[in-house]
Image (cartoon, helix red, strand yellow):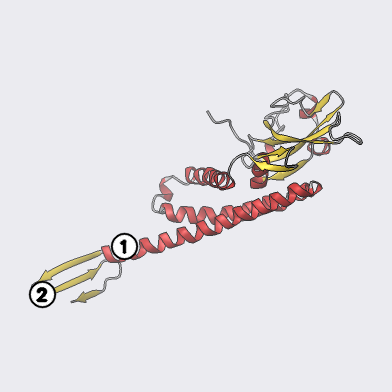
Amino acid sequence: MMEEVFKEEDFYRDDGGPTESFSYCHYIFYTGENTEYGPDYDQFAIVINSEYPYIRLTKKRGNSHIPCGGSLQPTTGGWFASLAESERDEHCPKIAWGFAAVFLANLRYDDGQKDYVELKDRNVVIKEYYSKYLKIYLDRHNGLKYSKITLVQKELDFLAEHETLIRVLWEKCTPLQKYSQLFEYASEAESDYESFLHRRNSEIERERDGNDNSKSISNRTIIQNGERSVYIENNTGNVTIK
């Protein structure tokens, strides 16, 4: 069963709930002095129960791993849930939103290559992300007042809305610039996602136009009389004699 999701601004509002659900990324930024691996580190955690996921920077300081000891969720009565939003962001800043956040969560660090490696093919991640939000849109537009709108047109409407939103989410990702290499990789991935949206938009428009042409041919009443045929174009009212 899919976990209930919330808008970003709704977390911790009601007596510390609902709390964020974390999935920790597969790499850690070590900050120990003069050593590759130190006792303190920063780590990314993607908030998976947000309608549009975002990443918080979590930290280990001595024996304490904030905000919740490496658990999947802070407790509603705990210290992190009791903080003001600005205080939570001070302790565990938000780093990335939307597709960039999902992309960063799909990385691991390879010590041999000294580089990041994608856990799942990027094209698969792109299509899964797109399909998830298209389904949400269609589920929200399946009432009777939408019954005369074709699925093709609904997807075009979704694309217009989605492209604007993902651009806004990416523009919020400026805090990620602190991690210059990851910011560069995320920027490339974001560009790939936007290119996918543009291609998909062109494909759907061609499909719509193709369907319109098919309808113009099929919506005919044909009256045959010997060698002559009368074509009555139902959608235009024109009469053609051949």
Q: Nearer the viewer, residue 8 or 92?
A: 92
Relative placement, left or right, of 3 versus 203 is right
Residue 188 horizontal/vertical position (percent): 67, 53
Label 2 or label 1, whichever lies nearer to me, is 2
Indicate the quadrant where residue 53 lies.
top right
Residue 131 horizontal/vertical position (percent): 51, 45
Position of the C terminus by quadrant = bottom left
Q: Nearer the viewer, residue 203 or 166?
A: 203
Relative placement, left or right, of 213 versus 223 is right
Which residue is denoted by mark 2 in the rendering?
Answer: 227
Image height of 224 relative to 96, above or below: below
Q: Nearer the viewer, residue 63 or 27?
A: 27
Residue 109 horizontal/vertical position (percent): 72, 38
Indicate the quadrant where residue 212 lies.
bottom left
Tell which residue pokes out farthest to the right in this image. 34
Which residue is depicted at the point 43% across and 55% down? 152
Give the CA separation, mark 2 to mark 1: 25 Å
Callout 2: few (<14), some (14-19), or many (20+) C-alpha neighbours within 10 Å?
A: few
Which residue is depicted at the point 57% across and 44% down? 129
Three-letter amino acid code at disc 1? Lys
Three-letter amino acid code at disc 2? Glu
Q: Earlier in the sequence, mark 2 or mark 1?
A: 1
Judging from the image, what secondary structure is the residue with disc 1 in?
helix
Tell which residue pokes out farthest to the left in this image. 226
Judging from the image, what secondary structure is the residue with disc 2 in?
loop
Which residue is depicted at the point 74% across and 47% down? 182
Give me the disc on residue 51.
none
Give me the disc on residue 215.
1
